Structure formats: C-alpha cells, structure tokens
Image: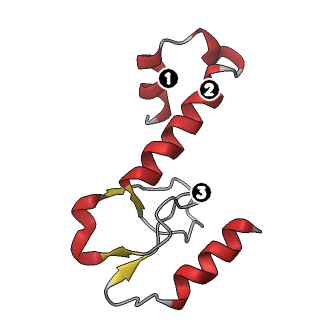
Amino acid sequence: AVKMQQRQAIYENFDPISMTICCVPTICHIGEPIGLEKLFEAVKVICNNESCREGQYMHKLCFDQWEDTVLTFLRSTGRARSWSEKQRLQNLWT
C-alpha cells in the first residue's frame, strides 16, 4: 500500500518526455522521477523477465539499498550462506 501511494504521488508530477520512474522493486528512497537529463546519476538495470514493464533505471541510492537487501537475504539462504561476499556479489549479477 505504501509503494502504491508513493507511486501515485510520483506520477502526479511525471512528464514521460523528460522523466522516467525509478524501477526499484522496494520503496523508492528519493520519491521523485529520474530526469532523463540526469541518467548519469542513475543505475541502468535490465530485467531478465520479458514481461517486465517496470523501467530500466534506479536512483543510485535506491539501487545500493536494494542490492544490500538482496545480499543480506543471500547471506541467510541455502547454499549462498557458504559463499564469500565476493561470490555473492558475482552470483547476484551473473
């Protein structure tokens, strides 16, 4: 419910010609669209789900927080528990 309310607030000021929405799957920490002229401040992500329509960019802060959340999850999950931090990071992105 919080994410939906946040997205509605972002869309109120959204201009699709000059902006894109942060596609972080959790809550956006910035709370505003990413200006297309500021993509250098964003992280481009490519979803491997062909049906994904979420977008291609996350705010750097949102990406860092999301990546940390996923790595924390991997530390306590199955065989990933025995991986080194370097292995977790490599396996997350391959």
Residue at the extreme right of the image, as rendered: 1
Please indicate whether residue 61 sits to the left or right of residue 9 in the image.
left
Contact flag, marks 2 and 1 (Cβ < 8 Å): yes
The front one of 52 and 70 is 70
Q: How far apart, in angstroms, are the residues tagged by discs 1 and 3?
A: 20 Å
Please indicate whether residue 35 sits to the left or right of residue 81 in the image.
left
Nearer the N terminus, badge 1 or badge 3? 3
- The image position of residue 90, as x and y in percent, is 42, 26
Contact flag, marks 1 and 3 (Cβ < 8 Å): no
As drawn, the label of residue 74 is 2
- The image position of residue 77, as x and y in percent, is 70, 22
Q: Is residue 11 above or below residue 40?
A: below
Identify the amino acid type marked 3: Pro
Name the secondary structure under disc 1.
helix
Disc 1 residue crowd, few under 14, some 14–19, many 20+, Cα 10 Å: some
The residue located at (46%, 17%) in the rendering is 85
Disc 3 residue crowd, few under 14, some 14–19, many 20+, Cα 10 Å: few
Q: Is residue 76 above or below residue 26?
A: above
Nearer the N terminus, badge 2 or badge 1? 2
Q: How far apart, in angstroms, are the residues tagged by discs 3 and 2?
A: 17 Å
Nearer the N terminus, badge 3 or badge 2? 3
The residue located at (60%, 67%) in the rendering is 51
Name the secondary structure under disc 3.
loop
Which quadrant of the view contains residue 38?
bottom left
As drawn, the label of residue 25 is 3
Contact flag, marks 3 and 2 (Cβ < 8 Å): no
- The image position of residue 8, as x and y in percent, is 63, 82
Q: Quadrant of the C terminus?
A: top left
Identify the amino acid type marked 2: Leu
Q: Is residue 12 above or below residue 41?
A: below
| Residue to which mark 1 is pinned | 88
As drawn, the label of residue 37 is none
